[in-house]
Image: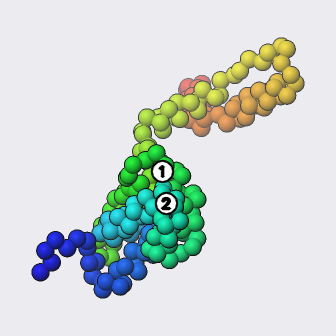
């Protein structure tokens, strides 16, 4: 019976599981994020949180404990020199799990295990922003006034932008003008 036995077995032997979690923790520290299954990420998260706590202590003993888990000098150095100072004032919660959906071949849940202060969550794109961009394009075609005392470079830039705006007339306006002209010509023939 496994009464009060914590942790997931992840379908592996103890040695395989330990090695896999060590490698995942080292990868998180080196790359600041990894993409893996939800169960593995939750187990690796425990290990990474403990390692960052060791890094915050900064003692020789803590460095030895971290190296005993990671078995990677580069990852240990990055942990103590780059990552730990960032989390100096944080009391925990150094990582986040971002759900990415399901893996196509076996439908297992896939997540992104990230270090919190190294990545900011990107806001979702609003439809209002795209509408604002469409409205701003016709406003660019308006003629701008040139100051009399302005330097030559500014005058040349404004004239060039006006010429480009005039050359890039909307196709719809041209089509409407042609349609009006053809209508006038047909009326005159009648």
Please report contact status of discs 1 and 2: CB closer than 8 Å, yes or no.
yes
CA separation in Å, label 1 and label 2: 9 Å
Mark in front: 1 vs 2: 2
Q: Rate crowding at label 1 as few (under 14), some (14 to 19) or many (20 or more) other CA atoms within 10 Å.
A: some
Please state which of residues 137 and 95 is positioned toward the viewer in this rendering. 95
Q: Nearer the viewer, residue 155 or 138?
A: 155
Q: Residues within 10 Å of mark 2 (few under 14, many from 20)?
A: many
**Residue 117's spot in the image, x, y percent?**
48, 50
Q: Specify the quadrant of the image occupied by residue 5.
A: bottom left
Residue pictured at 59% horizontal, 38% vertical: 171
Q: Is residue 180 left or right of residue 109?
A: right
The residue at 47%/36% (across/down) is: 129
Q: Which residue is mark 2?
A: 55
Q: Is residue 101 left or right of residue 115?
A: left
Q: Residue at x 57, y 57 (%)?
A: 82
Where residue 75 appears, x then y in whole percent?
54, 69
Count of all numbered marks drawn on residues in the image: 2
Q: Tell me what residue is drawn at x 26 percent, y 78 percent.
A: 9
Q: Is residue 84 left or right of residue 15?
A: right
In terms of sequence position, does the residue under pointer 1 or pointer 2 come before the other? 2
Q: Is residue 70 visible?
A: no
Secondary structure under tag 2 reads: helix
Position of the N terminus by quadrant? bottom left
> Viewer-proximal residue, 111 or 2?
2
Image height of 52 relative to 9, above or below: above
Question: Which residue is denoted by mark 1 in the rendering?
Answer: 87
Q: Using the rendered view, name the quadrant where residue 37 is placed.
A: bottom left
Question: How did the renderer colour the structure?
Answer: rainbow
């Amino acid at each position: 019976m496994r009464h009060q036995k914590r942790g997931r077995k992840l379908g592996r032997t103890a040695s395989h599981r330990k090695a896999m979690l060590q490698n995942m923790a080292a990868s998180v520290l080196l790359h600041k994020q990894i993409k893996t299954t939800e169960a593995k990420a939750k187990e690796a998260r425990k290990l990474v949180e403990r390692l960052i706590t060791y890094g915050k202590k900064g003692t020789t003993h803590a460095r030895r404990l971290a190296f005993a888990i990671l078995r990677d000098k580069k990852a240990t150095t990055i942990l103590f020199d780059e990552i730990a100072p960032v989390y100096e004032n944080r009391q925990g919660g150094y990582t986040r799990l971002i759900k990415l959906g399901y893996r196509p071949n076996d439908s297992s849940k896939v997540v992104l295990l990230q270090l919190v202060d190294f990545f900011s969550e990107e806001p979702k794109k609003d439809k209002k922003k795209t509408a604002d961009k469409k409205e701003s394009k016709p406003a660019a075609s308006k003629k701008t006034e040139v100051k009399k005392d302005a330097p030559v470079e500014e005058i040349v830039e404004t004239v060039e932008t006006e010429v480009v705006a005039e050359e890039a007339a909307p196709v719809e306006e041209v089509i409407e003008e042609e349609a009006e002209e053809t209508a006038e010509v047909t009326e005159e023939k009648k």
